[in-house]
Image (cartoon, rainbow, N blue to C red):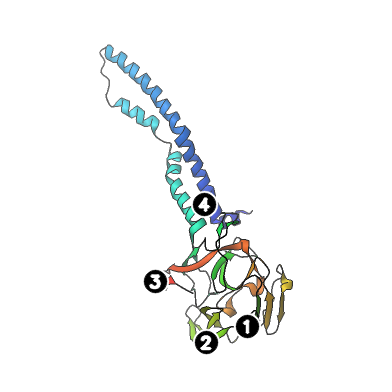
Amino acid sequence: MSFQSILGNFALILFVLTVGTGIVWFLDVFFLSKQRRLAADKALAEFDARTAKLEADGIRVEQGKRAEIEASLLRQPVWIEYSGSFFPVIALVFFLRSFLYEPFKIPSSSMLPTLFVGDLILVNKFEYGIRLPILNKKIIEVGNPQRGDVMVFKYPVDPTVDYIKRVVGVPGDKVVYRNKRLLINGKALDYQTMPDFLDEEHLNYSKQYKENLTGVSHRILNDDNAPAFVRDPFNFPKRENCTYDTEGFSCVVPDGHYFMMGDNRDNSLDSRYWGFVPDQNIVGKAFFIWMNLGNIKRIGSFN
C-alpha cells in the first residue's frame, strides 16, 4: 500500500491512532501508574527518614517539600498524558464513523440536481449491514441497497477514492438505456418534464425531468448536445454482461453487484463506463445534507 493511499484512507489512520493511544492508556492505567506510585512511595519513605533525622538534630524542614516530591514523581510524562486524553475522543470518532454515520463532501456536479458541489452529507453506515472497519467485510446482515438509493461506495477502479451515485440496478436486473431513457427488467420508467435547470457553477441550462425509478421519484438532468451512446467504456470485470450500441447500452447486473448512475446523466462517470459495484465496496446510504457553506438553505434530507 502506497503512502498516498494510506493518507487517502482516513479510517485506517483513525484505527492506527485508536490502537496506539489505547495501548498507551492501557499500559499507564495497569502498569506505568503503579510503577510511578511505587517509586513515589520509596522516595517519600526516604524523605521521611531524612526529615526525622534532621528534626532530631534540631533542623527545621520545609513542610511543602514532601508534597512537591510526590506530585513530581506521580506526574504523567507529556506523551502519556496526551495519549490518555486523546484516546477516548479518537475511539469515539472511530466508532461513530465505522458503524453509525460518516460525513462526506460532494466534490463534483455528477449528482445534480439532487446534490450540489460543496454539500456536506451524512452517510448511514449500518443501513446495508454492519461491516468490519478497514476490511469493509460485512459481519451482520441488516439490509441491501434498493433501486433509487443514493449510495457512497469505493470506486472499483481505485478503491482509495469514494464515489456517490444512485442505485439503478440491483443483482439480477436487466438495465437498458435507450435514447437517454431507462428500462428496468423490460419496463420503461415514467418521466415527467420539468422546467430547465440552471447550473450556476457552469452557467448553462439542462433539460430536467422527474424520473420514477420503480417507486422512487427523483430529478435528473439531460444535455441535448450530448450523445446517447457511451463513449469508450472501460474493460471492466464482467464486461460480457453488457452490450453497447449507438443508442445506449444494455447490462445484466451480476450477483453481489450493483449498477450506479449519476442524476446528471450526461455529466457523470458511472457504471456505464467503469462497470458494476461489488458489495464489498459499499460504504453506506447517503440521506442528509447537514451543511453547505455557500448555501445554508441546502440543509435537509433528499431523495
Q: In the visual, does 250 lie left or right of 289?
A: right
Disc marking residue 296: 3
Residue that mark 1 sits on: 187
In whole angstroms, how far apart are the C-alphas of marks 2 and 3? 28 Å
* Residue 205 x/y as whole percent: 51, 85
Q: Is residue 239 above or below residue 141?
A: below
* Residue 37 x/y as whole percent: 41, 28
Q: If you read the primary sequence from the N terminus, does the residue marked by circle 1 or circle 3 appear first?
A: 1
Q: If you read the primary sequence from the N terminus, does the residue marked by circle 1 or circle 2 appear first?
A: 1
Label 4: how many Cα within 10 Å (few below 14, some 14–19, many 20+): some
Label 1: how many Cα within 10 Å (few below 14, some 14–19, many 20+): few
Task: For mark 1, give the secondary structure.
Answer: strand
In whole angstroms, how far apart are the C-alphas of marks 4 and 2? 45 Å
Q: In the visual, does 65 lie left or right of 237?
A: left
* Residue 104 x/y as whole percent: 50, 64
* Residue 226 x/y as whole percent: 61, 84
Residue that mark 4 sits on: 14
Q: If you read the primary sequence from the N terminus, does the residue marked by circle 4 or circle 3 appear first?
A: 4
Label 2: how many Cα within 10 Å (few below 14, some 14–19, many 20+): few
- Residue at position x 62%, y 63% in the image: 279
Q: In the visual, does 253 lie left or right of 114?
A: right
Amino acid, disc 2 = Gln
In whole angstroms, how far apart are the C-alphas of marks 1 and 4? 46 Å
Could you tell me if the residues under marks 2 and 3 are in contact, i.e. CB atoms within 8 Å? no
Could you tell me if the residues under marks 1 and 2 are in contact, i.e. CB atoms within 8 Å? no
- Residue at position x 42%, y 26% in the image: 38
Could you tell me if the residues under marks 4 and 3 are in contact, i.e. CB atoms within 8 Å? no
Residue that mark 2 sits on: 192
